[in-house]
């Protein structure tokens, strides 16, 4: 019994050659950005990975197959689609078994990447502990996934819509290494600094690769969270983003938005409230993460074991 994986020709060739591959998620396309910027960004992220010497593998479920790498036609279909399922660990198998189509979150993309022998994954931000989680219990399944699946996730930290101190506490409890890249502070997605120290700091892609390979040698389950600060020229300063976040959070509470709808609702409202600036920043940080992820993947491909074929 094997998983129903379908590899793109490009990813298939890269696996055979032991070339570096970077996994990319699809929820950011279907639920994280509006059309047509979602499609444009997905294409640019893939181009960025290629320019940095790695092969992009955008992951999604289409008609009951788990696709590892999409061609341009599939990418466009996904970017235009409505009512696509948002898949995490809980619903990935059900979506596949029912022959449906769904976009993978960080958690589901990690599962798929690991099945495909891909060790590095680039995204924007991860899900985390939501504000008010002490009553709502809203803690993203992304955190548990980082604790159990051996994939290095390159993000720009966690969004300031979340409770960042609680997110870091839960990651520590779960034994997930949180690595700020090139600075001491844990980055806060749209802003370079959160005011919270990251537990670990690394300045080179090779160090990140070596740490993941060492976890494997120790038999430690789970991956690593890399928090790569947004480029300075694209940053939105805290004073500007915080009022938009507060307004969006208050509206979400007033409208009773819950469960899977919370993150997409907040992102869409903050986009409107910042007149598109939040989206420009989001695009810049994803591209930046794609570049770093490609370097980490190259370092792993050089030193690490080849992906199982
Ligand atoms: N970061 C973004 N845009 C997104 C997401 C993260 O910049 O759309 C998505 C990711 O797929 C992440 C998910 O896994 O939001 C988290 O959702 P939740 O909070 O419901 O677990
Ligand atoms: Mn949630």
Image (cartoon, rainbow, N blue to C red):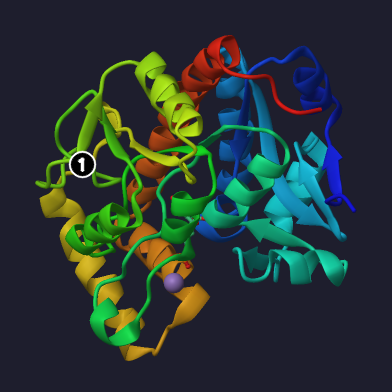
Place of residue 77 in the rendered image (x, y in percent of width and height, measured from the top left): 78, 51
Residue plotted at (40% across, 33% down)? 284
Number of dots carrying numbers: 1
- The reply to whether the residue tagged 1 has its Cβ within 8 angstroms of ligand 1 is no
The answer to whether 55 appears left or right of 121 in the picture is: right
Q: Nearer the viewer, residue 8 or 284?
A: 8
Residue drawn at 50 percent across, 32 percent down: 216
Residue 54's place in the image compared with 138, above or below, is above
Q: Residues within 10 Å of mark 1 (few under 14, many from 20)?
A: many
Relative to 237, 40 lies left or right:
right
Residue 107 location, x and y as percent?
54, 55
Q: To which residue does mark 1 refer?
A: 186
- Residue 191: which quarter of the image? top left
Up/down of 210 relative to 83, above or below: above
SS for tag 1? Answer: loop
Where 5 falls versus 13 (above or below)?
below
Tell me if residue 30 can be seen: yes
- Please state the horizontal and vertical placement of residue 301, each as a whole percent of the image: 60, 15
Quadrant housing the C terminus: top right
- Identify the residue at image location x=58%, y=22%: 49
Q: Quadrant of residue 251?
A: bottom left
Taking the image as shown, residue 47 lies to the left or right of residue 181, namely: right
């Amino acid at each position: 019994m094997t998983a129903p994986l379908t590899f793109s020709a490009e990813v298939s060739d890269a696996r055979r050659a032991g070339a570096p591959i970077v996994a990319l998620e699809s929820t950011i396309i279907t639920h994280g950005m509006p059309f047509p910027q979602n499609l444009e960004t997905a294409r640019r992220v893939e181009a960025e990975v290629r320019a940095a010497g790695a092969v992009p593998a955008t992951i999604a479920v289409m008609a009951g197959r788990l696709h590892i790498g999409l061609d341009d036609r599939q990418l466009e279909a996904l970017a235009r689609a409505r009512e696509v399922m948002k898949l995490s660990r809980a619903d990935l198998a059900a979506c596949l078994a029912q022959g449906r189509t769904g976009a993978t979150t960080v958690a589901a993309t990690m599962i798929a990447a690991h099945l495909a022998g891909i060790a590095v994954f680039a995204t924007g931000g991860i899900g985390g502990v939501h504000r008010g989680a002490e009553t709502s219990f809203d803690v993203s399944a992304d955190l548990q996934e980082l604790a159990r699946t051996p994939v290095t996730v390159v993000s720009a930290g966690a969004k300031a819509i979340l409770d960042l101190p609680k997110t870091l506490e839960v990651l520590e409890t779960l034994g997930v290494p949180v690595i700020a890249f090139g600075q001491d502070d844990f980055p806060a997605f749209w802003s370079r600094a959160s005011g919270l120290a990251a537990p670990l700091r690394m300045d080179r892609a090779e160090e990140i690769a070596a740490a993941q390979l060492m976890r494997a040698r120790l038999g430690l389950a789970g991956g690593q969270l890399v928090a790569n600060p947004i480029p300075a020229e694209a940053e939105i300063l805290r004073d500007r983003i915080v009022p938009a976040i507060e307004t969006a959070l208050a509206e979400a509470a007033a409208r009773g938005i819950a469960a899977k709808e919370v993150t997409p609702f907040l992102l869409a409202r903050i986009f409107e409230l910042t007149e598109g600036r939040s989206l420009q920043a989001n695009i810049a940080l994803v591209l930046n993460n794609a570049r770093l992820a490609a370097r980490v993947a190259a370092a792993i491909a050089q030193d690490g074991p080849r992906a199982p074929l």
